Amino acid sequence: MKMLFTIASRFTTTFLFILLATGVCFAQLTKINEDSAYIRKHYNKMERMVPMRDGIKLFTSIYIPKDISATTTYPIMLNRSPYSSAPYGDTLYKLTLGPSMLFARDGYIFVYQDVRGKYMSEGEFEANRPFIPKKTSNKDIDESSDSYDTIEWLLKNIPGNSGKVGSWGISAPGFYATMSAIDAHPALVAVSPQAPVTDWFMGDDRRHNGAFFLMGSFSFISSYGARRPAPSPRGLPGFTAYGTPDSYEFYRNLGPVKNANEKIFKGENPLWNQLMEHDTYDDFWKSRTPVPHLKNVKPAVLVVGGWFDQEDLYGPLKTFAGIEINKPKSQNLLVMGPWIHGGWARGTGEYLGNIRFGSKTSAFYQKEIEFPFYSQYLKGKPDPGLPKAYIFETGANEWRKYDQWPPSQSVEKKLYLHPDGKLSFSPTVTTMQVGVPPSFSAYTSDPAKPVPFTSEIRILRGSDYMYEDQRFAASRPDVLVYESEVLTDDITISGNVMANLFVSTTGTDADFVVKLIDVYPGNAPNDSPVNPAMKMGGFQLLVRGEVMRSKFRKSFSKPEAMVPGKIENVKFDMQDAAHRFKKGHKIMVQIQSSWFPLVDMNPQKFVNIHKAEASDFQKAVHKIYSSGSSSSYIGVRVMGE
C-alpha cells in the first residue's frame, strides 16, 4: 500500500481513476510505480528545442542514463510522435521508457519528439506528410529529413551517446519510424515500424478499398485534425456531444456524411476537409504512402503488426512487402501476433475477448524478438537468429518461423460459394456448368436499416468487433451465409485472403463486405477468459473481414458506375491471415452490403458519397453469383503437409 500512496503523491486522482477505469489493476499500478522509481533513480531528463534545416524547432524530451562517462556510452532510441512527448517539464518523468522496460533497465538514451505542428513543436502539421525524393533547398522538408536532422543534432549535442541510433513507433509514430528509414542517417542502424500508418485510402484507418471508415475517423479526426492556434502541452478536445451511448443511433440520426461538416465541424477541421475533398485515390493519397520510396533501405527493419488490429493491419503487411520486393541488403523482418492495435506493447497478450491464445504472447515478443533485435544492432550483442517472418497462427495458438511471407509451403486455393449456401474448396458440377444461366443468391440492402458492425451498444468503435461472435449478423435477411461441412482435418491458411465476387445490383453502386469466419463445434468448451457463462458452442470467430466499394472495382482513381442488372467482377484484397481451422470446426463466409457505422452507408447510387443528399439513398437488391463463369470464391493460401 505504501507504493500506491507514493503513486498517488506523484499523479493526480484523475490519472489514477483513468488507469483503473481502463482495466489497470492494483498489481499493475505497483509495477508502474516500480518502473517509475527505477527511471527516476537511473535517468536524468532534459528538454530541448531541436532545429531543423528550415529553421523550425521541434520539442524534444531526452532521458539520459546517469552513469554516462568517457568510457560508458549508450545508443539512442528515437520515437517521433504526433501524440505528445508528455509529461512536459524537466522534473516530470514518463512512467516507462522505450518499447518496453527491458530497454530502460539495460540502458539506452531515450528521445521523444513532438513532430512539427503538434503539441510543443513549431511549424505546421501535415498528416502523413509526403516524401520529397529530390530536395532542392532547405525549405524542402519531410519526415525523413526531420528524422535525419534530429539524429544529427542528437549525435553532436547529447553527451554519452555511442553513435548508434534506433527508431520505433506504433501507429502514426510507426509511420514516422518508416520515414526515418528512407534516406536514413548513417547512424540509424535499426528501425521498427509497428502498425505503421501506410495508406489512408487503401487499408489503414480512414478508408479500406475506398470505403470510408466513418465512426473511427469522425471521433479521431475531431481532435487530431483540429487547427492548433499555438504550440501547447495540451491536445485539442475531440467531439463528445453524442447524446447517446449508441453509435448506430447517433450516426443514423446524423444522416449523410456531409452533415458532419454542416452540423458539427462547420468546415473548421482542416484534416476532415481533406478527407471529404479527396474521395478517390488521387495524387493527394498517392503522395502520402511511403511504400514506393522503400528502396535502398539501409537500416535493419523489424515490422510488427497484430492480426486483430482494428486500425492498421494493412500497414505492417504492405510496409514489409514494400521493403522486401526491393531486396534490401540489411535485414527486413516481419512479426505478426494475436494482438489489437499496439497490443504487443501492453498487457500480456494471453487473450482477446472470449478467445484464448495459450501463452503470454506480448511478453514473448518483447523478450525474445524485439529486445534481442535492437541489442544486436545497437549494442553488438549476438545475432538472435530471428526468422524472416515470425508469425502467430491463431486457432493453433502457436508461433511459426518462416523464411518468407507468405510461406513457400502455402498453396493458393479457392473457397467456392455454392448456390445452396455451401462452401467448399471443390467446385460442384453446378458450379462449373457452361452455357447455363448462373445461379445466384440475393438480398435487399436498405440504407435505412444497415447491418450493424457489432452487437454491442457502444459510441466509440473499440476493437471488440475484430474478434466478436458473428452470430448476430448471420441471422439477418440482408446477410448471405455460406458454410462448409464439418472439417475432417485441420486446414491452415497463411498469407493473403482475396475476395473474388461476381455480383449484380439494381442500383449503380454498392459496398460488399466479406467475412471469413471460424465456426466452433457445438460441444466447444465454455472457456472464455472474461465470461465463464459464455456459451462457446457454435461461436463464430471473425478471422478476417473487409469491405469493397464497388465503384472502385476497376480503378481506385477513376470510379465507375455499376450497370443495373449487369454481372460484374468485384475482386479485392482482404489482407493477410494465419489461422488454423481445426478438425470438427466449420468455415463460414458472410456477405453483406453495410457495416454500420464502422463504414459509412453507401447510397447505392453512383454519386460522390461525401456530397450525397438524404434523397440519394435507396434500397437495392444485390445478387452474388455462384456458378459457371460467374463462380464467386474466396482465395486463400493453404499450408501443405
Image: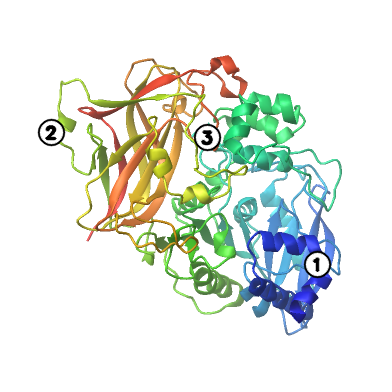
628 with respect to 290 (left or right): left
Q: For residue 611, what is the image quadrant?
A: top right
- In this rendered view, identify the residue nearer to me: 524 or 557: 524
Name which residue type carries label 1. Answer: Phe
483 with respect to 295 (left or right): left
What mark, if any, has residue 224 been given in the picture?
A: none
52 with respect to 300 (left or right): right
Q: CA distance from mark 1 to mark 2?
A: 69 Å
Whichever of callouts 3 and 1 sits on the residue coming sooner in the sequence is 1
Residue at the location (33% across, 41% down)?
589
Q: Please determine whether, in this image, residue 553 is positioned above or below residue 51.
A: above
- From the image, tell me which residue sits under label 2: 429
Looking at the rendered structure, the secondary structure element under dot 3 is loop
Whichever of callouts 2 and 3 sits on the residue coming sooner in the sequence is 2
Q: CA distance from mark 2 to mark 3?
A: 37 Å
Whether label 1 touches label 2, CB < 8 Å: no
Which mark is in front, 1 or 2?
Answer: 1
Q: CA distance from mark 3 to mark 1?
A: 39 Å
- From the image, tell me which residue sits under label 3: 596
Whether label 3 touches label 1, CB < 8 Å: no
Looking at the rendered structure, the secondary structure element under dot 1 is loop
- In this rendered view, identify the residue nearer to me: 365 or 31: 31
Residue 195 is situated, as x and y percent measured from the top left of the image, at 55, 53
Q: For residue 149, what is the image quadrant?
A: bottom right
Residue at the location (37% across, 37% down)?
475
Name which residue type carries label 3. Answer: Phe
How many residues crowd mark 1 within 10 Å: few (<14), some (14–19), many (20+)?
A: few
What mark, if any, has residue 11 been given in the picture?
A: 1
